[in-house]
Amino acid sequence: MRRDPNWRRTRAAICAAALVVLTPHSTLQARESDQQAALAASSPIPLCVDQDGTTPATRIVACTVAIDTKILKGRELAAAHLNRGQAYRAIGDQARAAADYSAAIELFDDSTNMASLNANQFLQRGIARHALDDVERALSDYDEAIRLDTGNALAHVDRGILMATRKADMRRAIADFDRALALVPDNVDTLILRGNAYTSVGEHGRALADLDRATELAPDNPRAFMVRGLVNARLGDMQRAFTDYNMALSLDPKYVDALVNRAAIFSMRGNIDKALADLDQAIELKPDHALASYNRGYANFAREDYEKAIADYTNAIKIDGRMAWAYNNRCLTRMVVGRDLAEALSDCDEALKLQPDNVQTRETRGFIFLKLGEKDIALREYDAALRREPDRPLALYGRGLVRVAKGDASGEADKAAARALMPGVERQFTSYGIN
Protein backbone atom coordinates (compact mmCIF):
# COMPACT_ATOMS: atom_id res chain seq x y z
CA MET A 1 0.00 0.00 0.00
CA ARG A 2 1.34 3.43 -0.91
CA ARG A 3 1.90 5.69 2.04
CA ASP A 4 2.22 9.43 1.87
CA PRO A 5 5.73 10.44 3.00
CA ASN A 6 4.25 13.11 5.25
CA TRP A 7 2.98 10.34 7.48
CA ARG A 8 6.26 9.18 8.83
CA ARG A 9 8.53 12.03 7.70
CA THR A 10 11.48 9.97 8.84
CA ARG A 11 13.70 11.51 6.22
CA ALA A 12 16.98 9.78 5.55
CA ALA A 13 19.35 12.20 7.16
CA ILE A 14 22.41 13.48 5.32
CA CYS A 15 25.29 12.75 7.61
CA ALA A 16 27.76 15.32 8.82
CA ALA A 17 30.97 15.00 6.90
CA ALA A 18 33.44 12.77 8.65
CA LEU A 19 36.74 13.58 7.02
CA VAL A 20 37.99 10.03 6.63
CA VAL A 21 39.52 8.41 3.58
CA LEU A 22 39.40 4.63 3.51
CA THR A 23 42.45 3.22 1.75
CA PRO A 24 41.62 0.74 -1.04
CA HIS A 25 43.67 -2.43 -1.16
CA SER A 26 45.08 -4.25 -4.17
CA THR A 27 47.78 -6.75 -4.98
CA LEU A 28 50.01 -3.97 -6.30
CA GLN A 29 49.52 -1.97 -3.11
CA ALA A 30 50.36 -5.04 -1.06
CA ARG A 31 53.67 -5.46 -2.94
CA GLU A 32 54.46 -1.78 -2.50
CA SER A 33 53.63 -2.07 1.19
CA ASP A 34 56.02 -5.01 1.55
CA GLN A 35 58.77 -3.01 -0.16
CA GLN A 36 58.16 0.02 2.04
CA ALA A 37 58.11 -2.16 5.13
CA ALA A 38 61.53 -3.53 4.21
CA LEU A 39 62.79 0.02 3.68
CA ALA A 40 61.29 1.09 7.00
CA ALA A 41 63.12 -1.67 8.80
CA SER A 42 66.43 -0.56 7.29
CA SER A 43 65.98 3.18 8.01
CA PRO A 44 63.38 3.34 10.77
CA ILE A 45 63.83 6.75 12.40
CA PRO A 46 63.51 8.93 9.26
CA LEU A 47 60.47 7.00 8.01
CA CYS A 48 58.87 7.03 11.44
CA VAL A 49 59.25 10.80 11.70
CA ASP A 50 58.52 11.70 8.07
CA GLN A 51 54.87 10.90 7.45
CA ASP A 52 54.68 12.39 3.95
CA GLY A 53 54.46 9.75 1.24
CA THR A 54 54.57 6.78 3.61
CA THR A 55 51.72 4.36 4.22
CA PRO A 56 50.43 3.69 7.73
CA ALA A 57 51.85 0.14 7.52
CA THR A 58 55.28 1.54 6.69
CA ARG A 59 55.18 3.97 9.59
CA ILE A 60 54.12 1.23 11.97
CA VAL A 61 57.11 -0.90 10.97
CA ALA A 62 59.52 2.06 11.05
CA CYS A 63 58.32 3.36 14.40
CA THR A 64 58.26 -0.11 15.96
CA VAL A 65 61.86 -0.71 14.91
CA ALA A 66 62.86 2.77 16.10
CA ILE A 67 61.18 2.24 19.47
CA ASP A 68 62.61 -1.25 19.94
CA THR A 69 66.20 -0.16 19.23
CA LYS A 70 66.14 1.80 22.52
CA ILE A 71 68.06 4.60 20.80
CA LEU A 72 65.25 7.15 21.17
CA LYS A 73 64.70 8.72 24.56
CA GLY A 74 62.33 11.18 26.15
CA ARG A 75 60.50 13.45 23.75
CA GLU A 76 61.88 11.76 20.63
CA LEU A 77 60.54 8.45 21.90
CA ALA A 78 57.25 10.16 22.71
CA ALA A 79 57.04 11.45 19.13
CA ALA A 80 57.67 7.94 17.78
CA HIS A 81 54.81 6.55 19.89
CA LEU A 82 52.58 9.40 18.72
CA ASN A 83 53.38 8.75 15.05
CA ARG A 84 52.83 5.02 15.43
CA GLY A 85 49.56 5.71 17.24
CA GLN A 86 48.36 7.84 14.35
CA ALA A 87 49.31 5.08 11.92
CA TYR A 88 47.45 2.46 13.97
CA ARG A 89 44.43 4.75 14.07
CA ALA A 90 44.56 5.15 10.28
CA ILE A 91 44.21 1.38 9.82
CA GLY A 92 41.46 1.12 12.43
CA ASP A 93 43.45 -0.50 15.27
CA GLN A 94 42.06 1.71 18.02
CA ALA A 95 43.40 -0.34 20.94
CA ARG A 96 47.03 -0.13 19.82
CA ALA A 97 46.57 3.51 18.87
CA ALA A 98 45.28 4.35 22.36
CA ALA A 99 48.20 2.53 23.98
CA ASP A 100 50.68 4.53 21.92
CA TYR A 101 48.94 7.84 22.64
CA SER A 102 49.02 7.09 26.36
CA ALA A 103 52.72 6.17 26.16
CA ALA A 104 53.48 9.40 24.30
CA ILE A 105 51.70 11.54 26.91
CA GLU A 106 53.47 9.78 29.76
CA LEU A 107 56.87 10.27 28.09
CA PHE A 108 56.22 13.96 27.45
CA ASP A 109 55.14 14.40 31.07
CA ASP A 110 58.07 12.44 32.49
CA SER A 111 60.83 13.89 30.34
CA THR A 112 60.33 17.54 31.14
CA ASN A 113 58.26 20.12 32.94
CA MET A 114 55.71 22.26 31.10
CA ALA A 115 57.97 25.30 30.88
CA SER A 116 60.59 23.48 28.85
CA LEU A 117 58.34 22.05 26.17
CA ASN A 118 58.57 23.84 22.85
CA ALA A 119 55.62 24.70 20.63
CA ASN A 120 55.84 21.56 18.53
CA GLN A 121 56.02 19.34 21.61
CA PHE A 122 52.93 20.99 23.09
CA LEU A 123 51.24 20.35 19.77
CA GLN A 124 52.29 16.69 19.77
CA ARG A 125 51.01 16.13 23.30
CA GLY A 126 47.81 17.95 22.39
CA ILE A 127 47.31 15.62 19.43
CA ALA A 128 47.70 12.58 21.69
CA ARG A 129 45.30 13.98 24.29
CA HIS A 130 42.83 14.95 21.58
CA ALA A 131 42.88 11.40 20.23
CA LEU A 132 42.10 10.08 23.72
CA ASP A 133 39.21 12.58 24.13
CA ASP A 134 41.01 14.47 26.88
CA VAL A 135 39.49 17.60 25.41
CA GLU A 136 40.30 20.29 27.95
CA ARG A 137 43.96 19.34 28.33
CA ALA A 138 44.32 18.93 24.57
CA LEU A 139 42.90 22.43 24.13
CA SER A 140 45.32 23.76 26.74
CA ASP A 141 48.25 22.20 24.86
CA TYR A 142 47.07 23.62 21.54
CA ASP A 143 46.66 27.06 23.11
CA GLU A 144 50.20 26.93 24.48
CA ALA A 145 51.64 25.72 21.17
CA ILE A 146 50.01 28.69 19.42
CA ARG A 147 51.11 31.13 22.14
CA LEU A 148 54.70 30.03 21.65
CA ASP A 149 54.48 29.98 17.86
CA THR A 150 51.62 31.90 16.28
CA GLY A 151 52.88 30.80 12.86
CA ASN A 152 52.28 27.11 13.55
CA ALA A 153 49.60 26.36 10.96
CA LEU A 154 49.13 22.76 12.08
CA ALA A 155 48.40 23.85 15.64
CA HIS A 156 45.66 26.16 14.35
CA VAL A 157 44.22 23.36 12.21
CA ASP A 158 44.18 20.83 15.03
CA ARG A 159 42.69 23.31 17.49
CA GLY A 160 40.06 24.15 14.87
CA ILE A 161 39.21 20.48 14.49
CA LEU A 162 38.84 20.14 18.25
CA MET A 163 36.62 23.22 18.45
CA ALA A 164 34.43 21.89 15.64
CA THR A 165 34.14 18.26 16.68
CA ARG A 166 34.37 18.36 20.48
CA LYS A 167 33.22 21.85 21.42
CA ALA A 168 30.73 22.42 18.58
CA ASP A 169 32.09 25.98 18.36
CA MET A 170 32.18 26.41 14.60
CA ARG A 171 32.96 30.12 14.71
CA ARG A 172 36.16 29.57 16.68
CA ALA A 173 37.00 26.65 14.41
CA ILE A 174 36.57 28.89 11.35
CA ALA A 175 38.85 31.51 12.92
CA ASP A 176 41.57 28.88 13.37
CA PHE A 177 41.15 27.60 9.82
CA ASP A 178 41.32 31.21 8.57
CA ARG A 179 44.63 31.68 10.35
CA ALA A 180 45.99 28.38 9.04
CA LEU A 181 45.05 29.31 5.46
CA ALA A 182 46.64 32.75 5.85
CA LEU A 183 49.85 30.93 6.80
CA VAL A 184 49.55 28.16 4.19
CA PRO A 185 47.23 29.36 1.41
CA ASP A 186 45.31 26.81 -0.65
CA ASN A 187 45.97 23.91 1.69
CA VAL A 188 43.37 21.42 0.47
CA ASP A 189 42.70 19.70 3.79
CA THR A 190 42.17 23.02 5.55
CA LEU A 191 39.88 24.27 2.78
CA ILE A 192 37.76 21.14 3.22
CA LEU A 193 37.65 21.60 6.98
CA ARG A 194 36.66 25.26 6.69
CA GLY A 195 34.07 24.44 4.05
CA ASN A 196 32.53 21.87 6.35
CA ALA A 197 32.52 24.36 9.23
CA TYR A 198 30.92 27.06 7.07
CA THR A 199 28.06 24.80 5.99
CA SER A 200 27.49 23.80 9.62
CA VAL A 201 26.67 27.44 10.46
CA GLY A 202 24.55 27.91 7.35
CA GLU A 203 27.09 29.85 5.27
CA HIS A 204 26.73 27.54 2.31
CA GLY A 205 28.02 30.02 -0.28
CA ARG A 206 31.35 30.37 1.49
CA ALA A 207 31.44 26.62 1.98
CA LEU A 208 31.00 26.04 -1.75
CA ALA A 209 33.74 28.56 -2.53
CA ASP A 210 36.18 26.62 -0.32
CA LEU A 211 35.14 23.24 -1.67
CA ASP A 212 35.14 24.32 -5.31
CA ARG A 213 38.70 25.53 -4.78
CA ALA A 214 39.62 22.25 -3.07
CA THR A 215 38.28 20.20 -5.97
CA GLU A 216 40.20 22.39 -8.44
CA LEU A 217 43.44 21.96 -6.51
CA ALA A 218 42.95 18.25 -5.82
CA PRO A 219 40.57 16.65 -8.33
CA ASP A 220 41.57 13.22 -7.02
CA ASN A 221 40.58 14.00 -3.38
CA PRO A 222 37.34 12.18 -2.52
CA ARG A 223 36.83 14.16 0.69
CA ALA A 224 36.43 17.43 -1.20
CA PHE A 225 33.64 15.97 -3.35
CA MET A 226 31.94 14.26 -0.41
CA VAL A 227 31.77 17.45 1.67
CA ARG A 228 30.70 19.51 -1.35
CA GLY A 229 27.92 16.98 -1.84
CA LEU A 230 26.85 17.60 1.74
CA VAL A 231 26.68 21.35 1.09
CA ASN A 232 24.70 20.90 -2.11
CA ALA A 233 22.27 18.60 -0.26
CA ARG A 234 21.75 21.24 2.41
CA LEU A 235 21.03 23.74 -0.34
CA GLY A 236 18.39 21.35 -1.69
CA ASP A 237 20.30 20.62 -4.91
CA MET A 238 20.10 16.85 -4.68
CA GLN A 239 21.23 16.25 -8.24
CA ARG A 240 24.53 18.06 -7.69
CA ALA A 241 24.91 16.36 -4.34
CA PHE A 242 24.34 13.00 -6.00
CA THR A 243 26.96 13.82 -8.65
CA ASP A 244 29.47 14.78 -5.96
CA TYR A 245 28.88 11.59 -3.98
CA ASN A 246 29.28 9.54 -7.13
CA MET A 247 32.56 11.33 -7.87
CA ALA A 248 33.83 10.67 -4.35
CA LEU A 249 32.96 6.99 -4.72
CA SER A 250 34.61 6.76 -8.13
CA LEU A 251 37.81 7.93 -6.42
CA ASP A 252 37.33 5.74 -3.33
CA PRO A 253 34.66 3.03 -3.68
CA LYS A 254 34.94 2.27 0.05
CA TYR A 255 34.26 5.80 1.27
CA VAL A 256 31.65 5.04 3.92
CA ASP A 257 30.24 8.54 4.41
CA ALA A 258 29.75 8.97 0.66
CA LEU A 259 27.93 5.62 0.54
CA VAL A 260 25.66 6.66 3.42
CA ASN A 261 24.91 10.04 1.88
CA ARG A 262 24.23 8.65 -1.59
CA ALA A 263 21.92 6.08 -0.01
CA ALA A 264 19.99 8.93 1.61
CA ILE A 265 19.32 10.41 -1.82
CA PHE A 266 18.35 7.01 -3.22
CA SER A 267 15.85 6.68 -0.36
CA MET A 268 14.41 10.14 -0.98
CA ARG A 269 13.91 9.20 -4.62
CA GLY A 270 12.18 5.96 -3.69
CA ASN A 271 14.99 3.76 -5.02
CA ILE A 272 15.08 1.65 -1.89
CA ASP A 273 16.98 -1.33 -3.33
CA LYS A 274 19.93 0.84 -4.34
CA ALA A 275 19.83 2.63 -1.00
CA LEU A 276 19.99 -0.69 0.82
CA ALA A 277 22.88 -1.87 -1.36
CA ASP A 278 24.91 1.22 -0.42
CA LEU A 279 24.00 0.95 3.25
CA ASP A 280 24.76 -2.77 3.45
CA GLN A 281 28.20 -2.06 2.01
CA ALA A 282 28.75 0.87 4.39
CA ILE A 283 27.84 -1.22 7.44
CA GLU A 284 30.03 -4.09 6.27
CA LEU A 285 32.95 -1.65 5.98
CA LYS A 286 32.18 0.17 9.25
CA PRO A 287 29.78 -1.71 11.55
CA ASP A 288 29.84 1.07 14.17
CA HIS A 289 28.56 3.78 11.81
CA ALA A 290 25.40 4.91 13.61
CA LEU A 291 23.94 6.89 10.74
CA ALA A 292 24.36 4.00 8.31
CA SER A 293 22.22 1.83 10.60
CA TYR A 294 19.73 4.67 11.07
CA ASN A 295 19.35 5.25 7.33
CA ARG A 296 19.02 1.53 6.68
CA GLY A 297 16.22 1.53 9.23
CA TYR A 298 14.50 4.23 7.18
CA ALA A 299 14.94 2.19 3.99
CA ASN A 300 13.57 -0.96 5.61
CA PHE A 301 10.63 1.05 6.99
CA ALA A 302 9.91 2.28 3.47
CA ARG A 303 9.85 -1.35 2.32
CA GLU A 304 7.46 -2.12 5.20
CA ASP A 305 10.02 -4.54 6.65
CA TYR A 306 9.33 -3.25 10.12
CA GLU A 307 11.23 -5.88 12.11
CA LYS A 308 14.43 -5.10 10.21
CA ALA A 309 13.76 -1.40 10.64
CA ILE A 310 13.45 -1.82 14.41
CA ALA A 311 16.67 -3.85 14.48
CA ASP A 312 18.51 -1.15 12.54
CA TYR A 313 17.24 1.67 14.75
CA THR A 314 18.18 -0.38 17.80
CA ASN A 315 21.71 -0.81 16.47
CA ALA A 316 21.99 2.92 15.75
CA ILE A 317 20.96 3.67 19.35
CA LYS A 318 23.46 1.13 20.67
CA ILE A 319 26.22 2.94 18.78
CA ASP A 320 25.02 6.46 19.59
CA GLY A 321 22.68 6.69 22.55
CA ARG A 322 21.95 10.37 21.85
CA MET A 323 20.54 9.87 18.35
CA ALA A 324 17.10 11.34 18.96
CA TRP A 325 15.77 10.52 15.50
CA ALA A 326 16.57 6.84 15.97
CA TYR A 327 14.43 6.80 19.13
CA ASN A 328 11.70 8.73 17.32
CA ASN A 329 11.66 6.36 14.36
CA ARG A 330 11.78 3.22 16.48
CA CYS A 331 8.85 4.64 18.45
CA LEU A 332 6.97 5.18 15.19
CA THR A 333 7.81 1.74 13.82
CA ARG A 334 6.75 -0.02 17.01
CA MET A 335 3.49 1.93 16.90
CA VAL A 336 2.92 0.85 13.29
CA VAL A 337 3.55 -2.79 14.16
CA GLY A 338 0.95 -2.41 16.89
CA ARG A 339 2.69 -4.20 19.71
CA ASP A 340 5.18 -3.17 22.36
CA LEU A 341 3.33 0.14 22.71
CA ALA A 342 4.85 0.64 26.16
CA GLU A 343 8.32 0.33 24.62
CA ALA A 344 7.23 2.67 21.84
CA LEU A 345 6.22 5.30 24.39
CA SER A 346 9.52 4.87 26.17
CA ASP A 347 11.31 5.55 22.89
CA CYS A 348 9.24 8.66 22.26
CA ASP A 349 9.92 9.86 25.80
CA GLU A 350 13.66 9.46 25.22
CA ALA A 351 13.41 11.28 21.88
CA LEU A 352 11.65 14.19 23.61
CA LYS A 353 14.35 14.37 26.29
CA LEU A 354 16.92 14.76 23.54
CA GLN A 355 14.79 17.03 21.32
CA PRO A 356 12.06 18.62 23.48
CA ASP A 357 10.60 20.62 20.58
CA ASN A 358 10.25 17.74 18.12
CA VAL A 359 6.67 17.99 16.84
CA GLN A 360 6.90 14.68 14.98
CA THR A 361 7.51 12.89 18.25
CA ARG A 362 4.47 14.62 19.77
CA GLU A 363 2.46 13.52 16.75
CA THR A 364 3.61 9.93 17.10
CA ARG A 365 2.74 9.94 20.79
CA GLY A 366 -0.71 11.14 19.82
CA PHE A 367 -1.13 8.09 17.58
CA ILE A 368 0.00 5.75 20.33
CA PHE A 369 -2.41 7.18 22.89
CA LEU A 370 -5.20 6.96 20.31
CA LYS A 371 -4.41 3.28 19.90
CA LEU A 372 -4.43 2.85 23.66
CA GLY A 373 -7.77 4.63 23.97
CA GLU A 374 -6.26 7.44 26.09
CA LYS A 375 -8.15 10.23 24.36
CA ASP A 376 -7.34 13.06 26.76
CA ILE A 377 -3.61 12.41 26.60
CA ALA A 378 -3.76 12.03 22.80
CA LEU A 379 -5.53 15.38 22.60
CA ARG A 380 -2.79 17.06 24.66
CA GLU A 381 -0.11 15.63 22.37
CA TYR A 382 -1.84 16.81 19.19
CA ASP A 383 -2.46 20.23 20.72
CA ALA A 384 1.23 20.49 21.62
CA ALA A 385 2.25 19.62 18.05
CA LEU A 386 -0.22 22.06 16.51
CA ARG A 387 0.84 24.92 18.76
CA ARG A 388 4.24 24.74 17.10
CA GLU A 389 3.05 23.88 13.58
CA PRO A 390 -0.65 24.66 13.08
CA ASP A 391 -0.86 23.17 9.58
CA ARG A 392 0.29 19.62 10.26
CA PRO A 393 -2.38 17.48 8.54
CA LEU A 394 -1.74 14.32 10.55
CA ALA A 395 -1.94 16.14 13.86
CA LEU A 396 -5.09 17.95 12.71
CA TYR A 397 -6.77 14.74 11.62
CA GLY A 398 -5.74 12.93 14.80
CA ARG A 399 -7.09 15.77 16.93
CA GLY A 400 -10.27 15.66 14.87
CA LEU A 401 -10.69 11.96 15.62
CA VAL A 402 -10.19 12.59 19.33
CA ARG A 403 -12.62 15.50 19.44
CA VAL A 404 -15.31 13.58 17.56
CA ALA A 405 -14.85 10.62 19.91
CA LYS A 406 -15.31 13.00 22.85
CA GLY A 407 -18.48 14.45 21.34
CA ASP A 408 -16.88 17.72 20.27
CA ALA A 409 -18.31 18.83 16.90
CA SER A 410 -15.22 20.94 16.16
CA GLY A 411 -13.47 17.69 15.38
CA GLU A 412 -15.09 17.60 11.95
CA ALA A 413 -13.54 20.98 11.14
CA ASP A 414 -10.12 19.62 12.10
CA LYS A 415 -10.63 16.61 9.84
CA ALA A 416 -11.75 18.80 6.95
CA ALA A 417 -8.74 21.06 7.36
CA ALA A 418 -6.46 18.02 7.36
CA ARG A 419 -8.04 16.68 4.15
CA ALA A 420 -7.53 20.05 2.48
CA LEU A 421 -3.83 19.93 3.35
CA MET A 422 -3.39 16.22 2.54
CA PRO A 423 -6.11 14.55 0.47
CA GLY A 424 -6.60 10.98 1.64
CA VAL A 425 -5.08 11.67 5.03
CA GLU A 426 -7.59 9.30 6.68
CA ARG A 427 -6.02 6.34 4.87
CA GLN A 428 -2.86 6.86 6.86
CA PHE A 429 -4.83 6.26 10.05
CA THR A 430 -6.92 3.31 8.89
CA SER A 431 -3.87 1.53 7.45
CA TYR A 432 -2.39 1.50 10.95
CA GLY A 433 -5.52 0.39 12.73
CA ILE A 434 -6.86 3.77 13.82
CA ASN A 435 -10.41 4.68 12.78
Image (cartoon, grey):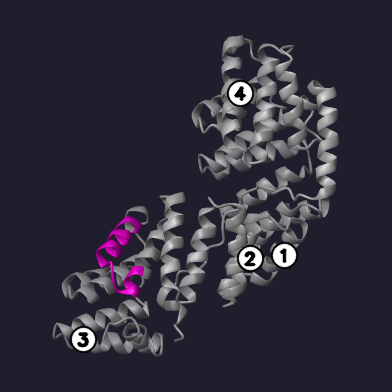
- Residue 146 % position (x, y): 64, 25
Give the quadrant of residue 76: top right
Give the quadrant of residue 61: top right
Q: Main secondary structure of the magenta part?
A: helix
Closer to the chain start, of discs 2 and 3, is 2
Circle 1: element type: helix
Q: Are marks 2 and 1 in contact (CB under 8 Å)?
A: yes
In the image, 173 versus 254, the foreground residue is: 254
Magenta part of the chain: 334-351
Q: Is residue 85 magenta?
A: no
Mark carried by residue 410: 3
Q: Which residue is mark 1?
A: 246
Q: Is residue 49 visible?
A: yes
Amino acid residing under circle 4: Arg
Q: Is residue 43 above or below residue 416?
A: above
* Residue at mark 1 to residue at mark 3: CA–CA distance: 52 Å
